């Protein structure tokens, strides 16, 4: 694979992610995480802290013009809840 020098190659481990969508730069991360942790616990999952969280802007330029803001997806790596 010919990768331009300006890009890093990242070894992506893969796996499951829970995804939230909100308004970019207006997200109450604490409130979002609280709701997400409750959802995960109720459904037998937990955060997988061995992998990084990610995010990306999903708004196309025309939608940004109409809405006046960007939407962002927030990805939290998850795994099946460990039983003790």
Image (cartoon, rainbow, N blue to C red):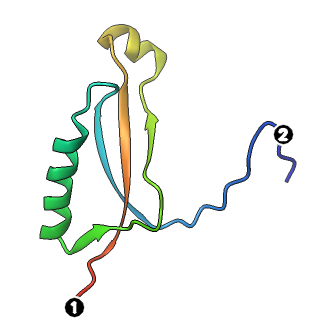
- Image disc number at residue 84: 1
Circle nearer the N terminus (2, 1): 2
Residue 26 position (above or below residue 20): above
Q: Quadrant of residue 81?
A: bottom left
For the C terminus, give its image quadrant. bottom left
Circle 1 Cα neighbour tier, 10 Å, few/some/many (<14 / 14–19 / ≥20): few
Relative horizontal placement of residue 7, taking residue 13 as reference (left or right): right
* Res 7 quadrant in image: top right
Placement of 22 over or under 53, stated as above or below:
above
Percent from the top left, x then y, of residue 35? 14, 51
* Distance of label 2 from label 1 (alpha carbons): 47 Å
Categorize mark 2 by other alpha carbons within 10 Å: few (<14), some (14-19), many (20+).
Answer: few
What residue sits right under mark 2 in the picture? 4
Residue 23 point in image, percent of width and height: 29, 27
Residue shown at 38%/50% (left/top)? 75
Residue shown at 37% from the left, 22% from the top = 70
Q: Secondary structure at mark 1?
A: loop
Vertical side of 20 occupied by 72: above or below:
above
Q: Locate residue 53, reporting x and y percent.
A: 43, 52
The count of marks equals 2
User: Residue at left 25%, top 71%?
Assistant: 45
Residue in the image at 20% along x and 54% along y: 36
Q: Is residue 27 above or below residue 67?
A: below
């Amino acid at each position: 694979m010919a990768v331009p020098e300006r890009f890093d190659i990242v070894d992506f481990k893969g796996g499951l992610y829970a995804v939230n969508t909100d308004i970019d730069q207006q997200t109450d991360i604490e409130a979002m995480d609280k709701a997400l942790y409750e959802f995960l616990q109720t459904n037998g999952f937990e955060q997988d802290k061995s992998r990084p969280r990610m995010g990306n802007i999903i708004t196309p330029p025309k939608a940004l013009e109409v809405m006046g803001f960007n939407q962002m997806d927030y990805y939290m790596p998850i795994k099946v809840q460990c039983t003790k």
